[in-house]
Image (cartoon, rainbow, N blue to C red):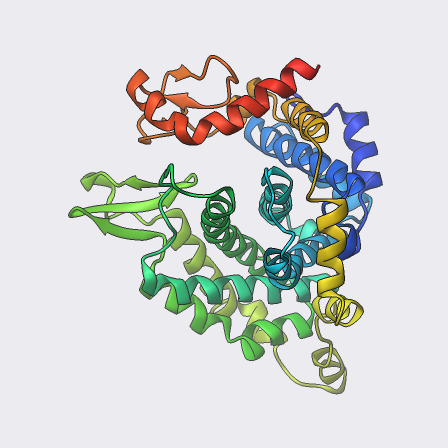
Amino acid sequence: MGDLELLLPGEADVVVRRLRSFPLREIGSGGWNHQHENLEKLNIQAILDATANQGEPIQELLVTHRKIPMLVEELIAVEMWKQKVFPVLCRLEDFKPHNTFPIYMVVHHEASIINLLETVFFHKEVCESAEDTVLDLVDYCHRKLTLLVARSGHGGPPEKEESQYSTPMQELQKQAELMEFEIALKALSVLRYITDCVDSLSLSTLNRMLSTHNLPCLLVELLEHSPWSRREGGKLQQFEGGRWQTVAPSEQQKLSKLDGQVWIALYNLLLSSEARARYCLSSFAKGQLLKIPEIWERLERENRGKWQAIAKHQLQHVFSPSEQDLQLQARRWAETYRLDVLEAAAPERPHCAYCGAEASKRCSRCQNEWYCCRECQVKHWVKHGKTCVLATQGDRAK
């Protein structure tokens, strides 16, 4: 691993070995939170390893210990929780959280896993190690890209606007909507990496991509709508690095990274000799084509009719933490997100949390947010003050 390490090689091996799937009822529990922290560490370490070009041990460990199928299942499980349990939870009369931090961790879990998969799926052996769950992953990517196309007619993701009148839950919903957009963009990259493996994909996967979902047509729609690009004030902007960035006139004729991902995926699906040669029917092929994704159907079957019971259980045991529990969790996250490691993993200089300009000053209390000037820091305090106090209390608890 590189000079900056969040996980030593021996620690990473232990963390990967202990990864496991959790029932929907246990999402947000203590054990689940501990694994979420470990996944974040793996995520950051994988990015550091890829950036340093010194081998990618996280990817190798995930393949060696056959954990890619488990990551796919966890990805789909939290997606189902967000669709089936979270809305029920929000409708419960007793659901009046004073702090949305525990819920945010669950909502953020999907982004953490898809980000890790995007980093490691660059390697073909990772796609091969996914085995039959690659079918489930293709279905997942199709769902995300379909939503991305549908949303492209509504102006893309919301801006990170701050409002002193927003409730914590309203702020959480805004963050979740922006996160959903970023998740879809990550899913696009994962899908492109899957198409790189057309020479080793099963016939059922190829059929799912070409016939069931007709992914080439969906990808063409993405190119037409380009939801990651927009015109604002007469200037071209592209969504990159979690925010909208203005594209310099000299750069506007260049193909963006996301456009490039779509074109490569289209080439792999339509023009590669492997895809055309393998898509032929035989008695064996017909049997392969009958395979279907299993994770979503199995989870829905196991939990059908239990959504409200799960929501009530989690309201009582997961999302009503004491102040002491919150401070302990803040301390654990401070240890997970070491600032020196995060700065090394960042692809560019930090930006102002209020206006987005390049920043050189950091909040002196929590050291988590960056600002370009004192004026922006004062304006942002309405929103940042809550998390700043919580983070500071967590540090003092050490």
Q: Is residue 157 visible?
A: yes
Residue at 42% from the left image edge and 43% from the top image edge: 166
> Residue 145, position in %: x, y?
48, 63
Q: Is residue 3 visible?
A: no
Q: Is residue 364 left or right of residue 28?
A: left
Residue shown at 67% from the left, 74% from the top: 203
- Residue 241 percent coordinates (x, y): 42, 39
| Image position, residue 216 (x, y; %) | 46, 71
Quarter of the image that includes the C terminus: top right
Name the one closer to the observer, 252 or 300.
Answer: 300
Where on the picture, by quarter, is residue 49? top right
Image position, residue 394 (x, y; %): 64, 21
Check the image and name the residue furthest to the left: 234
Name the residue rendered at 27%, 52% in the picture. Answer: 230
Residue 203 to residue 177: above or below: below
Q: Indicate the quadrant where residue 293 lies.
A: bottom right
Horizontal side of 179 relative to 113 (left or right) equals left
Quadrant assignment for the N terminus = top right
Question: How many numbered callouts?
Answer: 0
Residue 237 higher or lower than 259, as above or below: above
Residue at figure coordinates x 59%, y 39% from the top left: 98
Residue 6 lies in what quarter of the image? Answer: top right
* Front position in the image: 313 or 26: 313
